């Protein structure tokens, strides 16, 4: 009796062990074919010259020509700037959310997540309206306060593009930092205070160092998304030239697809590097 | 006394932060109801004419239909291949399972414009260049991670005992999945589908490369409209889109509870 039941359970156990990995196969195959292969194909296109031979000339000019280097630098600087501003703005909000908000914390989380329901076009349009010739800011400066005699041409300036990017990305920073702050044992801060540290010193020597992981997670996420941002810069760019904008231009007007592929690969390398940092951070947290 | 000033300053900062967060959104909602013939703020009077104008511009309507079809199609396709993968990955502790998880989530980390540009050439080479199918495939690449992540999140939090009970009572794996697992992970599927739908619906950097009269999605048409005109039609369309997203969120919340979603998200 026990023998037959054992025999009955054995095969089913084996299928339970063997079948599950197969469950992931369709998704993995799908991404290999429609995500990895296109990127490999893109890499090939970037090193095949117009006459069909192998060339690294596109990378050579991207990495030595001042014009292209400045574009890569602008891309990285813009993302870094947006990331730093997001940390400075986001940290106090995250701190307030975890430590001070109390019964308002639900409302704050709602207000942080709600903008994610709006389209990127809507938010970009919002910034255009705020700073349009007949928008809110010019209305205040010219008609209400009379500081200026004529409306300013404010749209299409780098500052507004940066503000718009921070607006899109800062909720991710707040949520990343808040998650880590939530896990900090408040007794550590109390101990510091009991030992004589004032609030400022407690914050800088206890709370801030303990929340660095949250800042790191948020920073990588924000940097990664800012790096590939495109819609905001097309509409509010203010003359900034970044890799995504150049790919768009190469595709649209110049139609130099090889060069656009090489630029895509540079952007991809930056993204993969960020992903690598992200995984290392997650793994360290797990250990 | 000094403590209070710090707290007050912090609270004031948070209020300013939310003014910054909400201003660009609320202003669009207000402008969509303007009676003026141009974009201005404050608005001179109220009117619904810009909402009516949406329906007079045929490309918006065509693109809206394409967008809805693609968003639903990509979400369904993502569920079909993503849910089984999530079920396996949520319960496996092996190193290569976490590697597969990282791989399945990796499209989220890659610049969309690169995915769009690279896919256009690759899919053209495969013979499905600029077409509905190509748009559907590429959108699925970026929607799949949302399904995998949310479903795996929900499933990992469930005890194994329900499925074991079903198996002991004689249900085969398929029956167990259909009657036990699926109902349990449905909140994750719904939440993931909502994220997936919104991601696809809002996508521009991928859809842009597959644009043609019959495959333009709503954001692509809106972008080209905005490059030529600056009038409140875009505001009206955005407001309508926001209203639909809020309604969708409320329905999912009503049926499954928003707290379950945020835990998984």
Image (tube, coloured by chain):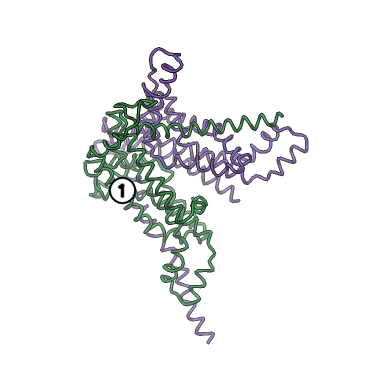
Which quadrant of the structure image shows residue A139? top left
Dot 1 falls on which chain? B
Front one among A187 and B25: B25
Colour assignment, chain B: green
Identify whether A7 is placed above or below B181: below
| Figure label count | 1
Classify residue B107 as left or right of residue A84. Answer: left
At x 52%, y 32%, the residue is: B17
Q: Secondary structure at mark 1?
A: helix
Tell me, yes or no, if residue A57 can be seen here: no
Classify residue B109 as left or right of residue B50. Answer: right
Q: Residue furthest right?
A: A195
Tell me, yes or no, if residue B53 can be seen here: yes
Q: Residue furthest top?
A: A149
Classify residue B252 as left or right of residue B50. Answer: right
Q: Residue furthest bottom?
A: A1
Q: Which chain is purple?
A: A
Q: Position of residue A10 (x, y in %)?
A: 49, 77
At x 48%, y 74%, the residue is: B167
At x 51%, y 57%, the residue is: B95
Q: Position of residue A36 (x, y in %)?
A: 37, 49
Front one among B224 and A222: B224
Q: Position of residue A101 (x, y in %)?
A: 60, 40
Tell me the residue that label 1 is attached to: B68
Front one among A180 and B225: B225
Identify whether B103 is placed above or below A147: below
At x 44%, y 25%, the residue is: A159
* Crowd tier of the residue under label 1, counting other residues whose Cα lies within 10 Å: few below 14, some 14–19, many 20 or above: some
Classify residue A192 as left or right of residue A267. Answer: right
Which quadrant of the structure image shows residue A20? bottom left
């Amino acid at each position: 009796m026990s023998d037959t039941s054992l025999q009955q359970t054995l095969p089913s156990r084996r299928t339970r062990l063997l079948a599950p990995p197969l469950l992931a196969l369709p998704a993995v195959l799908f991404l290999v074919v429609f995500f990895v292969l296109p990127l490999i194909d893109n890499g090939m296109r970037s090193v095949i010259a117009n006459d069909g031979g192998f060339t690294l000339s596109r990378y050579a000019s991207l990495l030595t020509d001042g014009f292209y280097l400045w574009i890569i630098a602008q891309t990285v600087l813009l993302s870094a700037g947006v990331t730093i501003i997001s940390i400075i703005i986001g940290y106090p909000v995250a701190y307030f959310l975890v430590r001070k908000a109390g019964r308002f914390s639900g409302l704050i989380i709602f207000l942080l997540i709600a903008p994610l329901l709006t389209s990127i076009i809507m938010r970009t349009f919002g910034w255009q309206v705020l700073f349009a010739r007949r928008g809110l800011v010019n209305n205040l400066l010219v008609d209400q306060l009379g500081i200026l005699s004529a409306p300013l041409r404010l749209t299409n300036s780098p500052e507004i593009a940066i503000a718009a990017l921070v607006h899109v990305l800062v909720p991710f920073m707040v949520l990343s930092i808040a998650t880590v702050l939530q896990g900090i044992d408040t007794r550590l801060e109390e101990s510091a205070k009991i030992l004589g540290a004032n609030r400022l010193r407690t914050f800088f020597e206890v709370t801030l160092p303990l929340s660095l992981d949250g800042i790191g997670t948020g920073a990588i996420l924000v940097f990664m998304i800012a790096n590939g941002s495109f819609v905001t810069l097309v509409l509010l760019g203010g003359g900034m030239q970044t890799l995504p904008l150049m790919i768009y231009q190469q595709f649209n007007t110049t139609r130099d697809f090889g060069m656009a592929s090489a630029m895509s690969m540079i952007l991809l390398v930056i993204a993969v590097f960020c992903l690598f940092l992200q995984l290392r951070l997650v793994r360290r947290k797990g250990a | 006394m000094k403590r209070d000033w710090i707290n007050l300053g912090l609270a004031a900062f948070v209020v300013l932060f939310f003014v910054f967060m909400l201003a660009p959104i609320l202003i669009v909602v207000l402008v969509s109801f303007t009676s003026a013939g141009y974009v201005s703020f404050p608005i001179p009077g109220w009117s619904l004419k810009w909402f009516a104008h949406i329906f007079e511009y045929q490309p918006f309507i065509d693109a809206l239909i394409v967008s809805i079809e693609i968003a639903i199609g990509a979400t369904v396709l993502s569920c079909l291949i993503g849910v089984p993968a999530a079920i396996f990955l949520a319960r496996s502790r092996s190193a290569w399972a976490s590697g597969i998880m990282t791989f399945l989530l990796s499209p989220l980390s890659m610049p969309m414009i690169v995915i769009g540009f690279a896919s256009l050439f690759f899919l053209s080479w495969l013979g499905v260049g600029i077409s509905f199918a190509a748009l559907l495939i590429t959108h699925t690449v970026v929607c799949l991670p949302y399904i995998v992540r949310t479903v795996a999140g929900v499933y990992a939090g469930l005890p194994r005992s329900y499925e074991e009970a079903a198996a002991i009572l004689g249900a085969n794996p398929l029956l167990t999945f259909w009657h036990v697992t699926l109902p349990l992970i449905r909140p994750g599927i719904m939440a993931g589908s909502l994220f997936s739908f919104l991601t696809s619906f809002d996508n521009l950097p991928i859809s842009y490369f597959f644009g043609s009269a019959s495959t333009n999605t709503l954001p692509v048409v809106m972008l080209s409209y905005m490059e030529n005109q600056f009038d409140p039609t875009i505001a009206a369309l955005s407001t309508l889109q926001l209203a639909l997203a809020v309604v969708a969120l409320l329905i999912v919340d009503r049926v499954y509870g928003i707290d379950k979603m945020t835990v998984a998200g």
